[in-house]
Amino acid sequence: MKRVVLSLLLCLFVGGLSAHAPKAEAQKKSAEQRQQEFAEMKVRLVAYYTAEIGLTPEEAEVFWPIFDRLQKSRWKINHERFKLIRPRRADEAPVDFARFNKRILELKVEEGKILEEFHKEMSQVLSPEKMYKFYFKIVIKLIHILVCMIYIANLGYIIILIICC
């Protein structure tokens, strides 16, 4: 019975992945189109955060430059982290695990310091209630939206497979 369930889940997983293979049209987007889509997404994100947190125009004027600086700093850290964990080619030197582990920890500490600095700056701009909305209400909603998007995209099978294994 267990084999049947696992086989069925595997078939659903493979079928779900093949149904969502990248389309040639999506791959042909120009850099300008991607930048335009990113700019549109940024506008929607600003509107969403502003409404959910309840930012006044004065608060928003101070909040967004600080938030953008936080995002850029975190992007740099995540970019370096992804470079570290990417699959290695056969002709590359083997991983120095001690150095790798040390660098990952350093990046996490660096990210923690950035978040701490962000929190200090935001505490001077936003009330504790608005900080709470930023940290928890919005993040939880965005995670929920992401999970729904994955499910709607018919990749719910991955979640089921992860839960079962």
Image (cartoon, helix red, strand yellow):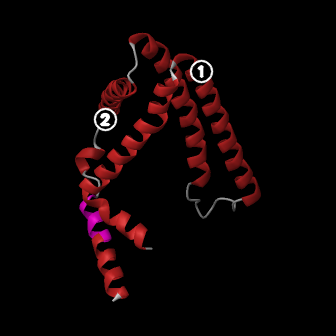
Measured from the top left, where is residue 17 in percent x and y? 30, 63
Q: Residue at x 25, y 59 (%)?
A: 154
The residue that label 1 is drawn on is 121
Q: Nearer the viewer, mark 2 or mark 1?
A: 1
User: Does dot 2 land on a helix, a strand or a loop?
Assistant: loop
Question: Which stretch is magenta?
Answer: 13-20
Q: Can you tell which quarter of the image residue 3 is in?
A: bottom left
User: Does dot 1 land on a helix, a strand or a loop?
Assistant: helix
In the image, taking residue 71 as reference, residue 105 lies left or right, namely right
The C terminus lies in quadrant = bottom left
19 magenta-colored: yes
Q: Can you tell which quarter of the image residue 52 is in?
A: top left
In terms of depth relative to the viewer, which is nearer, 94 or 40?
40
Q: Amino acid at mark 2?
A: Ser
Measured from the top left, where is residue 44 in percent x and y? 31, 28
In terms of depth relative to the viewer, which is nearer, 40 or 1?
1
Measured from the top left, where is residue 128 in percent x and y? 52, 26
Q: Residue at x 37, y 41 (%)?
A: 141
Measured from the top left, where is residue 34 in percent x and y? 33, 34
Q: Amino acid at mark 1?
A: Glu
- The 10 Å Cα crowd at callout 1, few under 14, some 14 to 19, many 20 or more, is some
In the image, taking residue 80 as reference, residue 147 lies left or right, namely left
Q: Which mark is residue 30?
A: 2
Q: Which mark is residue 165?
A: none
In the image, taking residue 93 as reference, residue 85 lies left or right, namely left
Magenta segment main secondary structure: helix
Specify which label sits upstream in the sequence, 2 or 1. 2
